[in-house]
Amino acid sequence: MMIRPLTLTAIAFATLTATTLTGCLVKQETPKPPITITNYVLRTYNDGDWIKYNFNATVTSGLTLINRIGTLEIRWGAKTLLTAPDGVTQYSVIEKTILVDNDVSDGEDAVKTVHYVQQNSDGSKTLVAMSGTGNQYYWLNDAGGATVTIDGIQGKAEPVKTFPSPLFVGQNYPYKYYLMDNCGIASSGCLDDVGSSSNSIDVVGNSTQRNTNIGNFANPFEINFSGSITPLGKNATNPLPLYFSIFDICSNGVSQHNGTMFIVPDIGIIELSNNCIALDGNGSNIYYDISIDSTNLSFP
């Protein structure tokens, strides 16, 4: 169809009028390219660092499905020397506080677990001890209390590396630890097991782009994980006194977990999906996603 000169004049006039009424045409900004990860060594954290996550969960209790919205925060505190139960060995650790509120609508306080973490020169993290509230320390070892000698649990206090570094695709890292109680300073060992934790970390890729509240990342590490928590000793038939990690918040008893997380080494976890299954009636099955909301960490 031929456009007549009168029609062209009308189109030009309409365009000029629209431009005049709006002032000027808005220039569209070019989207920023995604952030490409070039560092594979895990970050060393300092006092005052923090990350806040959004928490979305589907809780299965019997035949009932409940959706919950909450928050999860990780805060790094003071660096200190922690003296082991032998009264001699000291570990240079940083306090890592995990605050979990899996339902912000119930008005209850977040559940707190404190990890005492040794940050190694290669970026790997070694867990030395934990606490819940107050100054009650629970110490780790990799032997457990299967054999108890006259001076306590065989293995004594032995920190366990819980995250390898640097990361690379194809990496598989299994680890297990026992948490111990009644560890008196200057005694030879600990008298009670609290429970055991078994985990496996598999780095399966780094080619999936993830868009988050703090940035669009081109190639974060994709990691599959699985594991279980088993109460032992005096806690075998009682609730555990604390969550071991962000993987097992469905239960304070026997549980299993498996899922996927994405990690940016200069930050930490940016996304995590977990299926946590309570096996002994001390909790509910929870499928939950956490995604990074904000942080004060600087990164490229």
Image (cartoon, grey):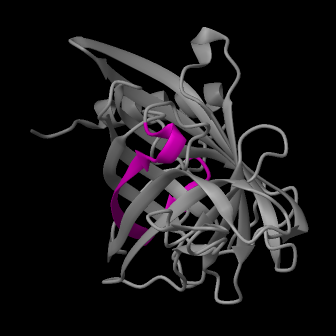
- Report the quarter where the C terminus lies: bottom right
> Picture quarter containing residue 138?
bottom right
Q: Nearer the viewer, residue 237 or 292?
A: 237
Whether residue 34 appears in this view of the structure is no
Whether residue 176 appears in this view of the structure is yes
Left or right: 279 as drawn, with respect to 234? left
- Report the quarter where the N terminus lies: top left
Measuring from the top left, give residue 261's x and y in whole percent: 41, 58
Report the residue that reaches farthest toward the bottom.
122
Residue at image position (51%, 39%) is 235
Measuring from the top left, give residue 286's x and y in whole percent: 36, 31
Residue 105 drawn above or below residue 201: above
Residue 109 drawn above or below residue 106: below
> Picture quarter containing residue 171?
bottom left
Measuring from the top left, give residue 40's x and y in whole percent: 54, 83
Residue 58 drawn above or below residue 231: above
Q: What segment carries the magenta color?
A: 213-236
Residue at image position (56%, 72%) is 154
**Magenta region includes residue 277:** no
Measuring from the top left, give residue 71's x and y in whole percent: 60, 32
Left or right: 180 as drawn, with respect to 232? right
> Picture quarter containing residue 284?
top left
**Magenta region includes residue 230:** yes
Q: Nearer the viewer, residue 53 or 100?
A: 100
Residue 261 drawn above or below residue 46: above
Image label count: 0
Residue at image position (45%, 20%) is 68
Residue at image position (79%, 70%) is 84
Left or right: 142 as drawn, with respect to 206? right
Report the residue that reaches farthest toward the left.
1
